[in-house]
Image (spheres, rainbow, N blue to C red):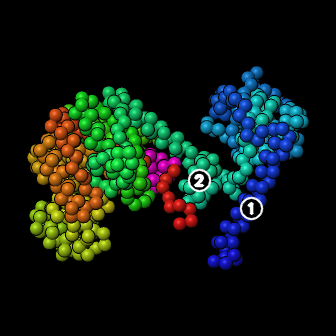
Amino acid sequence: MSKNDPQTGGREGEEQDVNRLMQQRQLKADQLREAGQNPYRNDFSPTHTTGAVRERYADETPPEGGTPDAAPLSDDRFAVAGRIVEHRSFGKASFVKLADRSGRLQVYIRKDRVGEEAYALFKKAESWDFLGARGYAFFTKTGELTLMAEDVVLLTKAVRPPPEKWSGLKDQETRYRQRYVDLVANPEVADVFRRRSKIVRLMRQFFDERDFLEVETPLLHTVLGGAAARPFRTHHNALDMPLYLRIAPELFLKRLVVGGFDRVYEIGRNFRNEGLSRKHNPEFTMLEFYMAYATYLDLMALTEALLPWLAQEVSGGTRLSWEGQEIDLAPPWPRLPVREAVLVGCQREELSPRLTAEIIDDPDRLQGWCGECGLLDREGIGEQLKQAESHGKRVGVLFDEIGEKHLPLDRPVFVVDYPAETSPLSRRKDADPSLVDRFELFVLRREIANAFSELNDPADQRGRFVQQIKDRERGDEEAMEHDEDYCRALEYGMPPTAGEGIGIDRLTMLLCDQPSIRDVILFPHMRPEGR
């Protein structure tokens, strides 16, 4: 592109403006040093946050026309510090707004109050510098609570200027790459991450109150297991051995159940070497918990208690809106078998010939139907169906690619009765061993949680691992490896147990009405700049 290209030329012009402003700001920092002042001081201790000052006078009613002669509202004095996010100068007086972790507060700085020397140093301050101020509170003529500065200190000189129109940084890629700018420029973004922190804190409270023990398990695994996913591989030099970043903590947590920890949970990162999308990030945060002497039905009840409570605490109610779609989290939630979800989805997509209950229950007829209706030639699903060597795997593919797209929208739904072939760690159903005691929770057709009654039969577990090895030999890169130590643990006996994993990133998306997983991860993975 030429320099005259509107896009390239615009970017180059912006870079030139930034460079010019940076030079001006650096000059002011140098002038401060020449005057014997450190532009990066660390000798100011705030006594209050801006929020504490606002709270102190929350019950005060601003008098009409402001506080006479800017008189103090009380004898209290406050020392606050923060980033300058607004700056208005009127010669011998200035208004600035300081932002700290609790919010924002206006500060009034007058030359006759702080002194000529301090005011001259303050005049070197600009938007996004850090400032400390001591003084008393009063109401301005417009009724805004304000700190009258009796002392002011420039703490940190920001040599890079805020983005143009900093109060509305909109470029999505820049927001994700420069989250440190995004959090200041868009206060609502910072609020999302405060709410995320509250969600995690509340989840800990929920499980701690029910006598669960929080634990930590390894991030580096010698055996690939716990979920069907492609791993990140690494190498330990001292031991000269390959390792995987964990894709799930499941097998270690269940070892702890064997060891006598009847109720355990872990909140931590998992890593899966898969694609990026609005719903996927290579590293993500999960809550995973295990409960002895419980079934997957017990965990349904627990989940129906947890999510509405979180919604009430975080969002103020169980009725939520996610990307314009209204949903009510109030329990009970419907249970939908995988088989029924596939039948409904295929019917809504008007596949011909029509998929019937008789066809889906007959392995040979279902395989033939997939060819007759053209699914084997459809991009994506066709290759998966060809590789599915069992009836259960075939049904699983149909659910993943068709059934999920047609799940209910108005309420959460528990999808149940998964084929055993798709769930190598789940307990088989007593009434039908071809299925397992498992559910996945979907909200607005997005998976939020996965749970099942755990397989604790060591012989059955070994057989499932053997099948996983065969799947890997056929080219399934997501199949698990044989974990003999885990089988040995089961031989010592694991009590009847149920376990569940809840995706904290997706749950935050739901409770904070965010469209992309990148909007709830502080530093999402992205391609390097320029690639």
Residue 367 locus on image (x, y percent): 15, 69
Instruction: Pinpoint residue 352: horizontal percent, then vertical percent.
Output: 21, 74
Residue linked to disc 1: 17
Check if residue 432 falls in the magenta segment: no
User: Mark number for residue 238?
Assistant: none
Q: Is residue 324 above or below residue 254?
A: below
Q: Give the camera-side residue of 163 and 159.
A: 159
Q: Secondary structure at mark 1?
A: helix
Can residue 515 be found in the magenta stretch?
yes
- Name the kind of residue labelled 2 in the image: Gln
Q: Which residue is mark 2?
A: 178
Which stretch appears magenta? 506-522
Dot 1 or dot 2, earlier in sequence: 1
Rendering coords of residue 117 (x, y %): 88, 36
Q: Decide: is 358 above or below 125.
A: below
Task: Looking at the picture, tell me which residue is in the foreground, 391 or 40.
Answer: 40
